[in-house]
Image: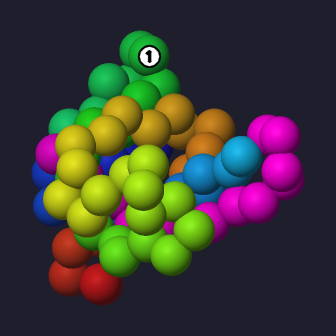
Amino acid sequence: MGFESGDYVKFEIKDDKTGVAEWMWLRVDSADESRRVVHGWLDSQLAIFATTVKLGQRLAISYDNIREHRKSNEF
């Protein structure tokens, strides 16, 4: 997919019990093409999941949850 350090990806986090979802940005550190996972830091201030996930937290996101990809010079 061509994810590089410094890129940004937008992904969705969803509570399966309530159906509530929130979109957020992750600043990419690295990508594992074979496992289809992007690693990076949360770059969004959250509203719904603020008690679960924090700004700056390191996360691993499946390619399946990524909805948008921007190069660092496009953000």
User: Which image quadrant is residue 65 in?
Assistant: top right
User: Which image quadrant is residue 64 in?
Assistant: top right
Residue 61 placement (x, y as % from top left): 44, 38
Split into 4 quadrants, where in the image is the C terminus?
bottom left
Q: Is residue 64 above or below residue 67?
A: above
Highlighted range, magenta: 16-29
Split into 4 quadrants, where in the image is the N terminus?
top left
The reply to whether residue 70 is visible in this rendering is no
Which is more toward the observer, 9 or 25? Answer: 25
At 60% across and 51% down in the image, what residue appears? 13
User: Which image quadrant is residue 27 in?
Assistant: bottom left
At 44% across and 71% down in the image, what residue appears? 46
Q: In this view, does 42 lie above or below 58?
A: below
In screen coordinates, is 69 left or right of 39? right
- Tag 1 residue: 35
Which is more toward the observer, 64 or 48? Answer: 48
Q: Is the magenta stretch mostly helix, strand or loop?
A: strand
Q: What element carries label 1?
A: loop
In screen coordinates, is 55 left or right of 23? left
Residue 21 placement (x, y as % from top left): 70, 61
Q: Is residue 28 above or below residue 17?
A: below
The reply to whether residue 36 is visible in this rendering is yes
**Amino acid found under the numbered disc labelled 1:** Arg
